[in-house]
Each structure stands twice: as C-alpha cells, then as structure tokens.
C-alpha cells in the first residue's frame, strides 16, 4: 500500500487543480511544495514593507470558468477586485488609445479601424473557440491510431470546415506568420497595431516580426473564448487564487505539504514509486505528477541517468528562453498620468508606442542585451484593491520586455540601470512618478527561474512555439501528460496546452491519469 | 606535380609512409575520413596471410573514445546493452549500443583500463551520442582517435611475431585480455582481440611510435611470412567467421531515414549481448517490449551452394521473397560460400533450406542462378587456436 495514490510536485495553480480533480474522483492525493506558500506563479508577496503585489503573474484573463465552477473557487474565497478591465495604451503624442471589449477609441484610430477591430476580434474569436476545444482535452497523437485521438482529430477537422472556406484558409495562412504583417494588413493605426502586437509577444522571446507570434496571440486570446472580455484582478492579488485553490484542495481531502522541496523522484528499474523530500522523508505513490517544468522535472528531480539518452536529448532541446521581467514599484501616493483619471488608473495600462518600437526593444535580446526603451504592461493594483498596501501608498507592477536571462556583464551590473530605464519610460506618461518611489524591485528572467522555479524564466514552462505545442509539448515522445516512464506524469504549463493562469494543463492531466487507470 | 594539402582531403594514418610503401597496386579507399588500402598486392594472398601466417592491418582510423571519471562504469552501463560491470580490469568486452527505440546504433569494444577508466572503440563516429549520453554523469569523454595508432596483427604466427618485438610472455594473454608493455620508452598496449576470428592481437601505441612499431614488427615477422592486408581481405575473413559490420549488415539506427530499416540486437543475432536485468540502458524499454511481442527479423548465416557469392541476393521460400543478403563471400579456408541474411520472422531456423536468387554478370550479360542454401548454426570458421591459452608457438 502506497502512502498516496498520487503525489503532485509543486503547489502552483496547475498542481493544485490537478490534485483537486484527482481527489474529486476519490484518490488520495498529496501536494508537495518547496516554498512556504502555495500558488506558484499565482502569488501575493511583499516586496517592500507594507507593499504587497502579485509578484509573478499579475492578471487573470483565461482562468478556465469550468475549473472555477468545478472547484467552486468562489466559495473557497476567490473574488475579483475588478473584472474585465479595459486596456489603455499610453500615447506620447496626444489622446491615449482605449480598448474595451470589441470597442476601440482614441489615439489615431478612425472609424475604419474601429470596424476592422470588430471584425478582427470576431475572426480571432472563431479561431480561439476552435483552439479552446483542442485545449480542453489531451492533445491527439497522430501515429498511434487511438480511437479517442481520432475522434478529436475528426472533430477538429469538422471545426476547421465549419469556419467556412475563407476563414479556414486564412487560419492556415495566419497561424505560422507574424503579428507584424497581420497588423499591417488589418489596421492603419500604429497605436492599435502595437497594442495588439504587445499581447502577441508577452512572455515570449519574440518580437512582432518573429514568426509564430500570431499563434501566441491566439493563445492569449483564448480567454475570450472562455468569456473573458479583458483582464481581471484577483482580490488580494493573485495569491488569492492560490489560497482559494488550496482551500478547495484541502476540502477535497488533498494533503498539502509546504516547505517540502522534492530532493528527487524515486524510481526502481521500471517505474516511478514516489518522491524523497529534501528533509529525507520518502513518500510513496502509484503516480508522481509533476507540475514543475519539464527540464526541472527530468534533469533536477528525476536525473538524466534515470532516463534513456534519446529522451534526455529531447528534454535538453526544449527551448525555455524568455525576454520578460517583472518590475515592482512602491509609491508614496497615486501617480498622475497625463490624461488619465483615477478610474483609468485601475485599468490595464500598456506602453507600446508602435510595433517598430516593440521590435526595437526586442532586437537587443538577440544579443543578450536589455532594451533601451522597454515596453510593458502595467497594473496599479492598489487602485482597485487598497488592501494590498498598508498605508496610503500605491503599488505598481509591470510586466516588462525585453530583458535577457543573463545579460552581458551580468545582472548585478545591469540591474539598477534597467530599473531606471523602466521608470524613465513610465515617467514619460507620468511625470514626477520617480519622486513617489520609495522602493523598487526587478525580477529578471534569472530571478523568476530561481524564485518561481521556471527554467529560463519562461512562464509557459517551455516556449510556446509551433514545434512545442500539442503532441510535441513538451517534446516528442513526452506527450499526453505521460512521460515514457511508468508512474511519472506532467501536469504543469510545460504540458499541453501551455502556460498563463489557465489551469487546463492541470485539469487535463488529472482526467488523463484517471482515464488511464494508473491509480486504480 | 605535388598538390598543396587541402582541409577536405582524406587523412593519412600514422602508418601511412609504411603502408604506402607496401601498397603495390595503389588501391585506396576512404575509411571514416582516412585513406586506407583496399588491397596491397592480391586480395586472396592477403587473406591467406591472415589464415596461414600473420596479416597486419592498420586499424588507426577506428574511433577511440576514452571514458573516465567516477561515473564511468554507470555511464557505460546506461550506454551499452551488456553489463559493463562484468568486464574486469585489463579485459575487453564486445558490445552494441542502441537508441531509445532499441535499435542498434553501432557495435564496438570496451577496454577496461581501470576501475573508472575505459576506452570505447567504435566503427561509427560516436562522439555526439557519447556526449549526449554523458549529461548527468560525472565522466569525461575524450576522442583519442588521432592520438592512438593501432595495428591488428592476426593469424596463427601473430603471437610469435609480436613476441619477437619484445612483448614477453604474450602467449599467456587470454582472449579478450589486454596487457601493457613498454615500447621504445613509450607505452604499448596489446589486446587479444580482432576481426578475423583467429588467434590475433591488436597493438596500440602513440602515433609517434607507429612507424617504428611497423618496422620492428615486419622485421620480426619476416621469417613468419608477415604480410599487410587491406579491407577487402578483412571482409572475407570477417564473413567467414561471422562478424557483422555497421553500415553493411545493419543501418546505424540514428542514421536511418526510412522507418523500419534499423534493427534491434535480437534481430542481429546478438541477444547474448543484451542484459535486460540491468535497471536501465538505452533501448531497454523497447527491447523488453520486443522480447514480449517478438521480433520482425532474424539474422542468419547461410551456407550457399555453388561458388557464386550471393551478394545482394533475395532469399526465397517457395518462390516468395522472405529476406535479403547483407554480406556474402566465397570463404577459401572453409571452402564455403557464406552469406549473411535478414529473414522475416518466423523464418530462419537452423537447418532450414531456402533458395538464394543470385544475379551476376558476364560481359554485360546478366544471369540468374537459384542456389539452394541452408541456415547454419554458427560461424563456419572457428579454430581452436583462437581461444587456446597459452597461444600455440610457431
């Protein structure tokens, strides 16, 4: 008799979701989390005395509603400080660009672009709905001729057909090209083009001209197929989601161990049997399900000598590059942004002057250098949720691009100057903000790797590129949440369908593990 | 006219000056980027030197990799199909290694120089795969192909010839044993190994001693009719004694392009090299599955009627094709016409009779013979002296 049916490595959102679904089906489940709090990338942490912030992910825009309902997250304390926020793209030259739902106004947007935006969203929504079907189940394999896979492929084929001839052929054309070209052929407004292009490149090591960026845009747009109209802000920061997920899990009987780093995954000749914690404690289970990224799982926890070499090679080939950093500013008071009122400051603010500006910011990344003029996605979370800050101050967090994993000369030499560059960019729109700053923090990709266990600082646990999705996510032969090694499964963002606070990887993994009957 | 050397030209081995001098017919081939003789003077006479006196073959292009470090044994155990821990110090083991699909990438020999010190000799270039396999192991992998010169000294009088250059008591060396000597102030390693199936040795020295080794050996072997031999003669000898060759009798798995063309150790008659009791090695899961579900092919040695080598022949049963020949030769010592073939399972039981469909050409005229053939129960050339220790003196 094993200690548990399943041990989940990592108490991030996917780990907790997987644990809850397994527990819901009557399995004895433990979650082991290295940190002292669960949530993973859904974490609220103080970076300065009295200033709490969503320290990794900062918005929720595609957390599966099915999961929210199945796991009764609202009853377990998940609430939103603000939902379906608009996006305001800050403009130097005049009126800011405002996007909300399928409405766009301001900046240089004319009636023609407004109509084009509506049509563009409608088309993207059709594609995203199709993708959502694919994302909501295990990815089909092509060669095994499994009946379930065949049915899914047939459904997808039918779904493609149902798009209509024009939209179907357009999808085939768009999916591999770049957002830069698509924006140029769709819109006249550089402001609007850039606002959409930023969505396409967030969390990637790509610029708008990089191939694959239409796919990453669609991945992000998936939230719209789930009913989101914009980003939402979790009450108490994203840690609120982590806590709600933990509460659900516990109520379903999941045993959550925090401060319980896994030293290694235990394996006999043929099968994974459990984990040994850093404390020396060993836990046995019929299955070990890792929500750590694939490289961490295989290289650090299982160990390459425990695997056949071809699989090692495939894991080593998974690309984990990122160009994304987090910046947190503690502010003495509410900054003044030119042309924005307080309600506006509670929206999602972005700095993406033009697609060319994003591309220019991207170029240095190729040479392991930081952007001169970073682009970013800003949340002044305390505007909607004063509970994050102890006094009358405010907290600003920004997802900033582009910052390499290890810049030439090292981060120690670059850290201050990069924060300064970020503040300089913000101060163009909020003059005087630098005088309000009482503390600041930069989390580089290297910091994100170290503190949130995401290899390369890549929040998708492996780049979201066409060669690393579906049946080849995370790698050929490591698919459908199984790993080629009996008893070891993946349930994190490194598995299909990938990252962002979505939760489908965890849910799909649980369903697949139950379907396979390994815990029976 | 002397042309300037180019980067792309074939390399010369450390024995090149001596080899070139004796290569009377100037017939050269490309062996893994080195220029090596196909034949020196006459293929059959070279072959008979191997079988009747002593033949010398320049082995230097053989890929040699040094594997050292605390995890060296564990590393090789994950790489190779056999249990490397059973190879003692100063012993040599023949093995194959597979990819994850359980298909053979190459065969070769592992020399155990110390507890954590090995040399792997392979026919194919292997450094890329060896380095991939090293991830997670505390080992260093060094390519020694260019820094060790080697000669195969094979045949009934080989021990006597080598003793003549100062390898004292060499006759006590057991098959698959190795021993270190000093040669002109440099280390010389000799192993009782070879590719001819007879009494024979392989001698390993630093490249700067290569020419001296050659000179002394040919001096010592003069009265024993020592002769150099090229790759054509070696091919006959290895077929006669049942040795397969990568790229000829199987497609190295990671070079395969067409699905299904690579072969497992079971399918190459090498199941004795596969130790499924080992906890993990590359291809183990696939080989376990193959063991349960059965292999698709069987490697056989065929004794073919007549004297036409059954090169590239189809093997027929009731006029249906059931396999193909990969290597074939008329083997003079055994006076037999031998062919290696891959047959579709369940064909290939010992004693089973088939027909080899042999095509040959005489003055642009193609002819077909249908030669009866029989599955043999082992290599036809397997003399006692191959294993006898002490080696018989001459």
Image (cartoon, coloured by chain):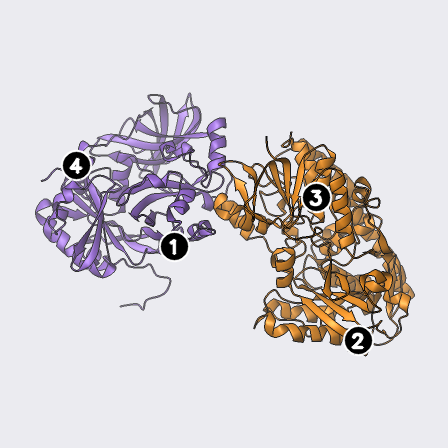
Chain colours: A orange, B purple
Q: Quadrant of residue A416?
A: bottom right
| Residue beneath disc 1 | B141
Residue A404 position within the rendered picture, expressed as x and y whole percent measured from the top left: 62, 66
Quick check: marks 2 and 1 in contact, CB under 8 Å?
Answer: no
Q: Classify 10 Å Cα crowding around label 2: few (below 14), some (14-19), many (20 and above).
A: some
Q: Where on the picture, by quarter, is residue A366?
A: bottom right
Q: Disc number at residue A436? A: 2
B20 left or right of A415 in image = left
Q: Which of marks 4 and 1 is nearer the N terminus?
A: 1
Q: Which residue shows up at 86% across the image and 64% down it?
A: A383
Name the residue beneath numbered marker 3: A506
Tell me, yes or no, whether dots 3 and 1 are on the same chain.
no
Distance between mark 3 and mark 2 Cα atoms:
41 Å
Same chain for the residues at labels 4 and 2, yes or no?
A: no
Q: Which of B339 and A280 is in front in this view?
A: A280
Are discs 3 and 4 less than 8 Å apart at CB? no
Question: Between marks 4 and 2, how big is the CA–CA gap?
Answer: 90 Å
Graded by Cα atoms within 10 Å as few (under 14), some (14 to 19) or many (20 or more), the crowding at tag 1 reads: some
Instruction: Say whether residue A223 is visible.
Output: yes
Chain bearing tag 2 is A
Percent across and percent down for residue A113 are: 87, 63
Q: Name the residue under label 4.
A: B389
């Amino acid at each position: 008799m094993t200690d548990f049916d399943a041990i989940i490595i990592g108490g991030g959102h996917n780990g907790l979701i997987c644990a809850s679904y397994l527990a819901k089906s009557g399995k004895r489940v433990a979650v082991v989390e290295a940190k002292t709090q669960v949530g993973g990338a859904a974490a609220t942490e103080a970076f300065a005395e009295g200033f709490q912030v969503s320290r990794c992910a900062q918005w929720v825009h595609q957390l599966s509603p099915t999961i929210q309902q199945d796991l009764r997250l609202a009853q377990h304390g998940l609430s939103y400080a603000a939902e379906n926020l608009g996006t305001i793209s800050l403009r130097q030259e005049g009126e800011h660009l405002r996007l909300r739902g399928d409405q766009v106004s301001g900046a240089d947007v004319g009636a023609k672009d407004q109509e084009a935006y509506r049509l563009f969203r409608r088309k993207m929504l059709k594609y995203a709905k199709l993708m959502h079907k694919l994302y909501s189940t295990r990815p089909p394999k092509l060669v095994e001729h499994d009946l379930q896979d065949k049915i899914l492929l047939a459904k997808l084929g039918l779904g493609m057909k149902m798009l209509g001839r024009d939209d179907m052929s357009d999808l085939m054309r768009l999916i591999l090209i770049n957002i830069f070209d698509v924006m140029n052929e769709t819109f006249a407004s550089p402001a609007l083009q850039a606002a959409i292009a930023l969505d396409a490149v967030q969390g990637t090591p790509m610029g708008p001209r990089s191939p694959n960026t239409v796919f990453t845009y669609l991945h992000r747009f998936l939230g719209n197929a789930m009913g989101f109209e914009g980003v939402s802000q979790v009450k108490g920061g994203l840690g609120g989601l982590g806590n709600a997920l933990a509460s659900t899990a516990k109520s379903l009987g999941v045993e959550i161990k925090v401060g319980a780093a896994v030293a290694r995954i235990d394996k006999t000749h043929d099968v994974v049997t459990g984990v040994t914690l850093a404390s020396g404690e060993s836990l046995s289970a019929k299955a070990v399900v890792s929500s750590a990224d694939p490289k961490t799982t295989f290289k650090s926890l299982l160990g390459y000598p425990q695997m056949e070499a071809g699989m090692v090679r495939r894991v080593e080939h998974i690309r984990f590059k990122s160009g994304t950093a987090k910046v947190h500013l503690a502010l003495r008071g509410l900054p003044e942004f030119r042309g924005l009122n307080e309600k506006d400051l509670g929206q999602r603010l972005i700095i993406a002057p033009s697609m060319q500006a994003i591309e220019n910011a991207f170029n240095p990344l190729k040479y392991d250098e930081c952007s001169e003029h970073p682009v970013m996605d800003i949340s002044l979370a305390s505007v909607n949720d004063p509970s994050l800050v102890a006094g009358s101050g405010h907290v600003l967090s920004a997802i900033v691009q582009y910052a390499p994993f290890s810049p030439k000369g090292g981060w120690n030499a670059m850290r201050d100057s990069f924060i300064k560059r970020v503040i300089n960019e913000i101060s163009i729109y909020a003059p005087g903000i630098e005088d309000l700053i009482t503390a600041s923090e930069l989390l580089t990709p290297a910091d994100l790797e170290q503190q949130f266990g995401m290899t390369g600082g890549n929040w998708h646990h492996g780049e979201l590129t066409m060669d690393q999705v579906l049946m080849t996510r995370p790698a050929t032969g490591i698919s459908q949440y199984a790993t080629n090694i009996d008893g070891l499964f993946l349930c994190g963002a490194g598995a299909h369908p990938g990252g962002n606070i979505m939760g489908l990887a965890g849910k799909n993994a649980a369903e697949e593990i139950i379907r396979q009957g390994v815990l029976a | 006219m002397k042309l300037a050397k180019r980067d792309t030209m074939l390399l010369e081995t450390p024995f090149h000056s001596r080899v070139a001098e004796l290569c009377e017919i100037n017939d050269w081939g490309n062996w893994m980027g080195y220029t090596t003789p196909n034949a020196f003077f006459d293929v059959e006479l070279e072959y008979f030197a191997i079988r009747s006196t002593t033949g010398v073959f320049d082995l230097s292009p053989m890929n040699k990799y040094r594997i050292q470090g605390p995890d060296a044994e564990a590393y090789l155990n994950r790489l190779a199909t056999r249990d490397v821990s059973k190879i003692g110090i100063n012993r040599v083991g023949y093995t194959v290694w597979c990819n994850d699909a359980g298909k053979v990438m190459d065969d070769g020999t592992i020399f155990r120089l110390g507890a954590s010190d090995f040399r792997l000799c392979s026919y194919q270039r292997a450094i890329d795969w060896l380095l991939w396999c090293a991830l997670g192991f505390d080992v260093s992998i060094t390519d020694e192909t260019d820094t060790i010169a080697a000669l195969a000294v094979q045949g009934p009088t080989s021990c006597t010839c080598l003793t003549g250059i100062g390898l004292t008591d060499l006759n006590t060396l057991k098959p698959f044993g190795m021993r270190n000597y000093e040669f002109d102030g440099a280390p010389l390693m000799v192993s009782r190994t070879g590719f001819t199936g007879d009494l024979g040795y392989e001698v390993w020295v630093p490249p700067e001693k290569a020419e001296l080794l050659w000179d002394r050996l040919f001096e010592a072997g003069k009265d024993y009719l020592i002769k150099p031999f090229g790759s054509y003669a070696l091919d006959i000898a290895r077929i006669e004694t049942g040795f397969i060759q990568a790229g000829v009798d199987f497609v190295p798995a990671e070079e395969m392009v067409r699905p299904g063309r690579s072969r497992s150790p079971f399918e190459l008659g090498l199941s004795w090299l596969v130790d499924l009791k080992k906890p993990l090695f590359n291809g183990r899961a696939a080989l376990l599955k193959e063991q349960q579900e059965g292999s698709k092919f069987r490697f056989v040695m065929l004794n073919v009627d007549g004297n036409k080598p059954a090169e590239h022949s189809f093997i027929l049963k009731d006029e249906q094709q059931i396999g193909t020949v990969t290597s074939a030769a008329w083997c003079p010592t055994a006076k037999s016409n031998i062919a290696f073939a891959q047959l579709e399972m369940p064909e290939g039981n010992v004693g089973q009779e088939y027909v080899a469909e042999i095509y040959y050409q005489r003055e642009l005229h193609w002819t077909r013979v249908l030669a009866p053939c029989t599955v043999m129960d082992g290599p036809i050339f397997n003399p006692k002296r191959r294993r006898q220790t002490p080696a018989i003196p001459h």
